[in-house]
Image (cartoon, rainbow, N blue to C red):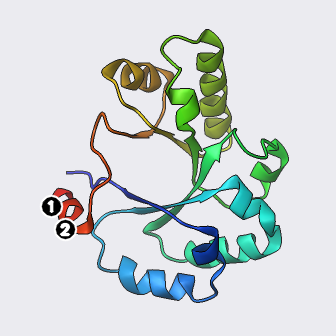
Amino acid sequence: MEKKPISVNVTARTFKNENFPNELFKYAKDIPAPLILEITERIYMDDVETSRKIIKRLKENKNVKIAIDDFGTGYSSLSYLKDIDTDILKIDMSFVRRIVEDEKIRAIVKAIITLAKDLNLSTLAEGVETKEQYEILKSMGVDLVQGFYFSKPLPENEAQLLI
């Protein structure tokens, strides 16, 4: 059975801590599933050079993947995508929330998915709360989904039971 990835939001303070990669590697070796570290565009753009170095260090562990969180809602500059060593573009829940009834939102989400695929990146849609949202996203080719439709965020002891 394919192991489901575990997603973790990383705060700016944690991400910029020089000991973060070492601490994470100690913990990550005990995780039996891929670990997706979610950082926002803002965290990355606050100090691009430092962010690149930290991401390079984190990606030394093959079990760690980097996701750009809230894609399309922050800086929205596509130019940084050619330089950042990320694995996943995370589609913000503000798009997912309106995907059923808003044709323009569907077009934007489809464009994000196409862009990601053209850049050899995976896509993750957050905030999926209904079967209809899930089916639309899957039909568009989104790779990963998360949201209350599947599970609410869990404490560590409950999450352990799922992996």
Task: Indicate left or right for 157 with 59 as reference.
Answer: left
- Give left or right: position of 34 versus 15: left
Q: Are marks 2 and 1 in contact (CB under 8 Å)?
A: yes
Nearer to me, 78 or 104: 104
Q: Please give left or right for residue 90 compared with residue 40 in the image.
A: left
Where does residue 151 sit, x and y in percent of width and height?
27, 43
Could you give the CA–CA distance between mark 2 and mark 1, rounded to whole angstroms? 7 Å
Identify which residue is drawn at 50% across, 22% down: 140
Instruction: Please say if 6 is above or below 128.
Output: below
Q: Which quadrant of the figure has residue 48? A: bottom right
What residue is at 30 percent from the left and 46 percent from the top?
152
At a point 76% along the width and 76% down the height, the residue shown is 50
- Quarter of the image with the C terminus in it: bottom left
Q: Which residue is mark 2?
A: 157
Residue on which disc 1 sits:
161
Q: Are there few (<14), some (14-19), or many (20+) residues within 10 Å of tag 2?
A: few
Q: Secondary structure at mark 1?
A: helix
Q: Amino acid under label 2? A: Asn
Residue 81 appears at what percent x and percent y? 75, 50
Residue type of the residue flagged with mark 1: Leu
Q: Quadrant of residue 86?
A: bottom right
